[in-house]
């Protein structure tokens, strides 16, 4: 069992930066593929980025590639998302998630993730 708690959301102007974190409980965090997702009202969750247990496999959606950076610290059981050059369309509720299955080409599928955080709101304004 893994519990995930996100932090770091807030409001920022377009072009600005925010950093999200996700702290995990439990002793097996280092074995999980971790991901960040986001959701806006009336839409499904969109995969933003994913990172393998050893950080050797990293994946991004095309919409954030080059602007967002995912990383993890297994010793601290913490997942990070550095978001730069934020755009209005980045406004969403951001979730972290943990998957027992290895990261791979299906990293953005919601169904492959076993545990989810409660979400943290990111609002980008003009």
Image (spheres, rainbow, N blue to C red):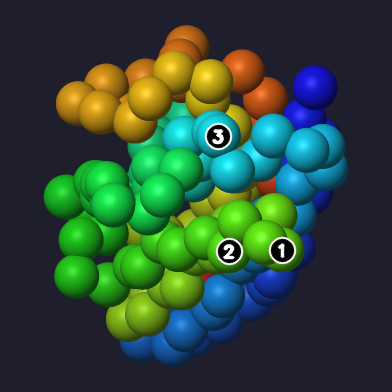
Give the residue at x 27% y 59%.
64
Q: Are marks 1 and 2 in contact (CB under 8 Å)?
A: yes
- What is the spatial separation of the Cα atoms under label 1 and label 2, in whole angstroms? 5 Å
Residue 24 vs residue 40, the one in the foreground: 24
Quadrant in which the N terminus appears: top right
Quick one: SS at disc 3? helix
Give the residue at x 53% y 20%.
100
Q: How many labels does the image show?
A: 3
Give the residue at x 37% y 80%.
84
Residue bearing the label numbered 1: 76
Residue 19 vs residue 25, the one in the foreground: 25
Quadrant in which the C terminus appears: bottom left
Quick one: SS at disc 1? loop
**Residue 73 visible to the viewer:** yes
Mark 1: few/some/many CA within 10 Å (<14, 14-19, 20+): few
Residue bearing the label numbered 2: 73
Residue 45 vs residue 125, the one in the foreground: 45
Mark 1 / mark 3, whichever is N-terminal: 3
Give the residue at x 46% y 43%.
53
Residue 37: horizontal and vertical position, in percent?
48, 41
Residue 68: horizontal and vertical position, in percent?
34, 67
Residue bearing the label numbered 3: 31
Mark 2: few/some/many CA within 10 Å (<14, 14-19, 20+): some
Relative to 112, 114 lies left or right: right
Residue 76: horizontal and vertical position, in percent?
71, 63
């Amino acid at each position: 069992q893994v519990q995930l708690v996100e932090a770091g959301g807030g409001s920022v102007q377009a072009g600005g930066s925010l950093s999200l974190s996700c702290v995990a409980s439990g002793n097996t965090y280092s074995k999980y593929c971790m991901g960040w997702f986001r959701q806006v009202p009336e839409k499904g969750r969109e995969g933003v980025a994913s990172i393998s247990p050893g950080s050797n496999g990293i994946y991004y959606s095309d919409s954030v590639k080059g602007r967002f950076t995912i990383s993890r610290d297994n010793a601290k059981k913490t997942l990070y998302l550095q978001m730069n050059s934020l755009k209005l369309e980045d406004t969403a509720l951001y979730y972290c998630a943990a998957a027992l299955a290895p990261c791979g080409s299906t990293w953005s599928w919601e169904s492959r993730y076993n545990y989810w955080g409660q979400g943290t709101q990111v609002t980008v304004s003009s």
